[in-house]
Image (cartoon, rainbow, N blue to C red):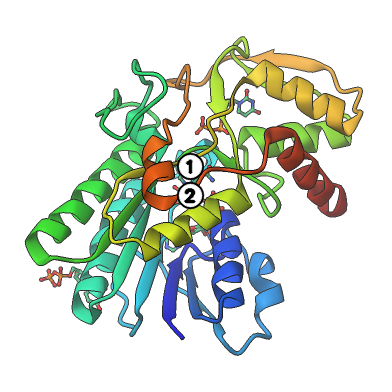
Amino acid sequence: MKRILVTGGAGFLGSHLCETLLGQGNEVLCVDNFFTGSKRNVEHLMSNPAFELMRHDVMFPLYVEVDEIYNLACPASPVHYQYDPVQTTKTSVHGAINMLGLAKRVGAKILQASTSEVYGDPEVHPQPESYWGRVNPIGVRSCYDEGKRCAETLFFDYWRQHQIQIRVVRIFNTYGPRMHPDDGRVVSNFIVQALRGEPITIYGDGTQTRSFCYVDDLIEAMIRMMAKDCAGPINIGNPGEFTMLELAQRVLELTGSKSEIVFFPLPADDPRQRRPDISVAKQVLGWEPKIALDEGLIRTIRYFERVT
Ligand code: NAD
Ligand code: UDP
Ligand code: UDP
């Protein structure tokens, strides 16, 4: 039985990860400051004696004994990471330093939940890991993008300097049950709006693209990555690419909603296109996503029908 620390474990992805790791017979220590996550996301795990929940902010040192660390602590929705941008950079950077310091002291393997945002608004399409990206260093998204880029730098420097066993995955847009109804990201916004009969809010003209991965596929890839002797970085995502207009239409059709579509200005620095090149993940992890967009949307819609 391994002792595994999941930071940000009470968030959307973290709660699924804790659940799967417990299901595989591990002990899980979930650390979260509940900024965007909540106890509700993990309440079904509380009665399991192998699960422990700790309120803690990763900007501060943490002294525990573990075998593996999954570092997910960081708000992921643009609305939430821009709410207190200084805190966002500190979470990524100080959080990475503290978790790497912990990994160094106890000899733990450590995985960083990095992001496709390290590619910024990309001129290379789809994005392979070898692409260095096009990120605005002083814009409203920079606290997240540059914070995550600096965290990657720290991971690779701790690896080169201290031989820490690191794993870096670059996660592309992932969705599914347990996203917060007010999370602000596009899939949860559109589904909640459609179910409530409210207007579907498209930012810009809706021709920008994203590639959406269902949460179960992502969690499987993260766990496979931890088990491999490979630092990465490795892209994890679903290469199916859709415009926001197409996504709105899929959600309207699958919910049977009569909501109208309304257009709002495009937020600053919003990437025009995004699609992962997952050849490395296929080769190294023997992984590719199995759940197509419609199937994942149906599962997510069923969840939001229950909770909203
Ligand atoms: P989320 O906002 O639901 O989860 C983040 C969790 O981290 C929350 O529980 C939050 O309370 C916690 N947290 C934030 N700051 C913290 C701090 N200083 N100390 C302790 N806990 C803190 O978002 P998510 O979608 O579950 O994302 C999880 C991770 O995956 C994030 O690091 C995010 O950057 C990364 N990621 C997610 C996606 C995606 O599409 N879901 C894409 C790329 C990267
Ligand atoms: N750290 C931590 N838990 C530990 C060990 C270290 O939170 O179990 C923190 C520690 O507070 C330090 C950071 O991780 O600020 C980096 O640790 P490292 O040993 O790399 O650096 P140093 O302590 O030499 O600055
Ligand atoms: N978006 C939108 N309507 C919304 C929320 C988001 O059209 O209600 C757009 C947003 O401008 C972006 C895309 O959907 O182009 C994905 O946004 P999200 O916040 O989910 O993630 P990210 O921009 O970080 O990929």
Where does residue 251 sit, x and y in percent of width and height?
78, 29
Please give the residue where the numbered disc 1 appears in the rendered image.
Answer: 83
Residue at position x 48%, y 27% from top? 275
Please give the residue where the numbered disc 2 appears in the rendered image.
Answer: 75
Near mark 2 (Cα within 10 A), the count class, few <14, some 14-19 or many ≥20, is many
Task: Choose between 233 and 257: the one closer to the eye.
Answer: 233
Find out whether the residues at labels 1 and 2 contact each other: C-beta distance under 8 Å: yes
Residue at position x 37%, y 40% from top? 144
Give the numbered dot on residue 251: none
Residue at position x 82%, y 54% from top? 307
Where does residue 236 sit, x and y in percent of width and height?
45, 43
Q: Which mark is first along the chain, 2 or 1?
A: 2
Where does residue 12 sit, x and y in percent of width and height?
59, 55
Q: Secondary structure at mark 1?
A: loop
Q: Is residue 35 left or right of residue 253?
A: left
Q: Is residue 105 left or right of residue 42?
A: left
